[in-house]
Amino acid sequence: MLTPDEKSACILIVDDHYDNVELLKVRLESWGYRTMTAGDGLEALQKIESEPPDLVLLDVMMPTMDGNEVARRVKQNRALPFIPIIMQTALDSTESKVEGLEAGADDYITKPIDFAELRARLRSMLRIKRLQEALEERERELLEVNEKLRWMSQTDALTGLDNRRHLSERLNEMFEHAKRLNEPFSCVMCDLDKFKSVNDTYGHQAGDQVLIQLAQVLKIEAREIDRVGRYGGEEFMLLLPGTVLDAAVTFAERVRKHIESRTFTFEGGSLQRTASFGVAGWPHPRITSCDALMKSADDALYVAKETGRNKVVRFDSDEFNAHISVEADDGAEPSPGEPADDGIRRAG
């Protein structure tokens, strides 16, 4: 008795002798298999590629293209699934069998065919195919799980942007790439102004919707080669490869205007908010590492928040330098390049 899997199996019979094809077709169908037939190697290849069978019962000696060449082409075609091939050969020599196996045949049977032996070989090869398919399915599932885990480890769950850890990794990679090729590279830090009041007034769900919509604005404005991520809370980072500092400031100003003119919506209401930006770029004599680049953009963002919000401040601009000098004189803020107190720097 055939198993349900065996009953659904389709076997392609390839032989240039009509009588042989018909004899095998009748016998295989009497056992419960479905069959396809081909009278030569070229026809067999066409049928295998258009409607892959579960197994091929392949005659070796055929005109135009013999069975060995058919087997070789089938096994070399990576677009095809695993298809067991059983060679039929009238030559019982070791050389003939070795040639068929090296061409890609998985098993062989000699003519005249012993049908009890053929039935056993068919079942054995189909069992191997099922095991192979099960293994491939397990591998596909494992790849999907690994890809999902990789995505989760790199992605901010709320916005779908890069998370802080992945941003840091990409910053290192992109900065080193820029140094190797001597190409400009800019970093933009963006912070939504007075975001705490959104959560306090409308609730955290409304705040989440605002952040999601802000993330969409940033993705729309960024190029495909740019990286956009949520650095933490309402703060976002944009990495702009191949972008000089002036162009990064222009980009940040465009994004600032987009946010300023946008109405953020959520269940039960809507609101408008502005955003502040800090921009830094490499090459620059005061920036020698990716950490210094990020801190310079962060320092510029701090100045933008401290001097009125809803503005873009360029690291090393006159406004930036003047404010940092005042802060340093007052002892309230360390000079650029030194560690900053996050409690002071995160004004809303």
Image (cartoon, rainbow, N blue to C red):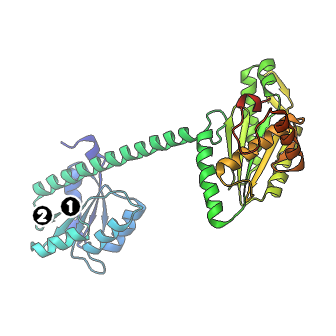
Other-residue count near label 1 (Cα within 10 Å), few / some / many at <14 / 14–19 / ≥20? some
- Name the residue tied to disc 1: 24
The numbered disc on residue 225 is none
> Would you say 57 lies left or right of 225 here?
left
The quadrant of the rendering that contains the N terminus is top left
Is residue 91 among what the camera can see? no
Q: Give coordinates of residue 185: x percent, y percent.
A: 71, 57
Asked whether disc 1 touches disc 2, contact meaning CB atoms under 8 Å apart, the reply is yes
Mark 1 against mark 2, which lies toward the viewer?
Answer: 2
**Front-most of 334 and 138?**
334
Q: Give coordinates of residue 317: x percent, y percent.
A: 86, 50
**Front-most of 174 and 12?**
174
Q: Give coordinates of residue 57: x percent, y percent.
A: 24, 63
- Name the residue tied to disc 2: 113
Tag 1: residue type?
Leu
> Would you say 24 lies left or right of 221 here?
left
Residue at the image position 35 percent from the left and 49 percent from the top: 136
Q: Give coordinates of residue 291: x percent, y percent.
A: 65, 47
Give the secondary structure at mark 2. Answer: loop
Q: Quadrant of residue 186?
A: bottom right
Mark 1 vs mark 2, CA separation in Å: 10 Å
Q: Quadrant of residue 59?
A: bottom left
Other-residue count near label 2 (Cα within 10 Å), few / some / many at <14 / 14–19 / ≥20? few
> Would you say 212 lies left or right of 36 here?
right
Tag 2: residue type?
Ile
The quadrant of the rendering that contains the C terminus is top right
